[in-house]
Image: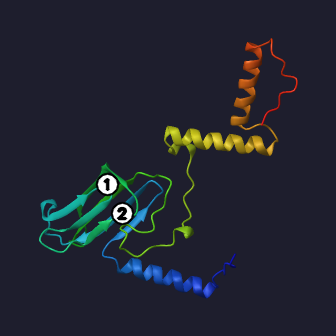
């Protein structure tokens, strides 16, 4: 196994500066949370929604002004929910307009390294997510997180996890249903 060389502070600063430069060169700005991604883009103030070409698909995006080369065109690194993704065009104080695009990620547990696969990547290992509350999660995810937290506490106390307890309960129930059987030498794996 090869040794992984940690970057020096100088190398890290250089990489960060290069990443910032690449992102600043993009004709749009973008931000993301773990569940969605937002793109903002300045366009001339005389444009209306009908002058724009906005094609949002499950795996790709085309964004631009009709009759011109697209400003953004390419494949997403991951899929989105098309029906829950939106765009708006608003006037800016500078006289231009801002096209705002909101994309709803399908996988809400995954950071994107770029908006489209042909764009420069960001280092997603450096993302520090905001603290979230269990109440912010959908029911299924919340249940999964609560179970993991419970199981972690149980392990720390030397107690059975929820799955282990379920097996014990099933065995006890089976013993009650079959009193004629001898379970004195039964072992749980």
Q: Rounded to the nearest whole Å, what is the CA distance between mark 2 and mark 1?
A: 8 Å
Residue 61 against residue 121 in the figure, above or below: above
x, y (%) of residue 145?
60, 44
Q: Secondary structure at mark 1?
A: loop
Tag on residue 58? 1
Write down the quadrant of residue 87 in the picture: bottom left
x, y (%) of residue 72?
27, 70
- Please state which of residues 83 and 118 is positioned toward the viewer in this rendering: 118
Write down the quadrant of residue 65 in the picture: bottom left
Residue 117 against residue 108 in the figure, above or below: below
Q: Which residue is mark 2?
A: 76
Q: Residues within 10 Å of mark 1 (few under 14, many from 20)?
A: some
- Please state which of residues 39 and 147 is positioned toward the viewer in this rendering: 147
Residue at 43% x, 61% y: name it: 32
Q: Farthest residue toward the top?
A: 180
- Please state which of residues 43 and 45 is positioned toward the viewer in this rendering: 43
x, y (%) of residue 123?
51, 72
- Please state which of residues 87 and 90 is positioned toward the viewer in this rendering: 87
Q: Earlier in the sequence, mark 2 or mark 1?
A: 1
Residue 176 against residue 117 in the figure, above or below: above
Q: Secondary structure at mark 2?
A: loop
x, y (%) of residue 101?
30, 60
């Amino acid at each position: 196994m090869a040794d992984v060389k940690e970057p020096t502070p100088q190398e890290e600063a250089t990489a960060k500066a290069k990443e910032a430069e690449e992102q600043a060169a993009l004709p749009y700005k973008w931000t993301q949370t773990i569940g969605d991604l937002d793109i903002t883009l300045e366009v001339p103030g005389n444009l209306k929604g009908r002058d724009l070409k906005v094609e949002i698909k499950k795996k790709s995006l085309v964004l631009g002004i009709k009759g011109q080369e697209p400003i953004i065109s390419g494949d997403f690194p991951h899929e989105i929910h098309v029906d829950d993704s939106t765009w708006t065009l608003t006037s800016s104080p500078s006289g231009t307009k801002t096209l705002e695009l909101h994309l709803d990620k399908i996988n809400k547990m995954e950071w994107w390294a770029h908006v489209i696969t042909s764009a420069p990547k960001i280092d997603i290992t450096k993302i520090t997510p905001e603290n979230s509350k269990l109440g912010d999660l959908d029911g299924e995810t919340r249940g999964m997180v609560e179970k993991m937290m419970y199981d972690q506490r149980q392990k720390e106390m030397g107690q059975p996890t929820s799955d282990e307890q379920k097996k014990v309960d099933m065995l006890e129930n089976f013993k009650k249903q079959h009193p004629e059987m001898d379970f004195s030498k039964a072992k749980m794996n």
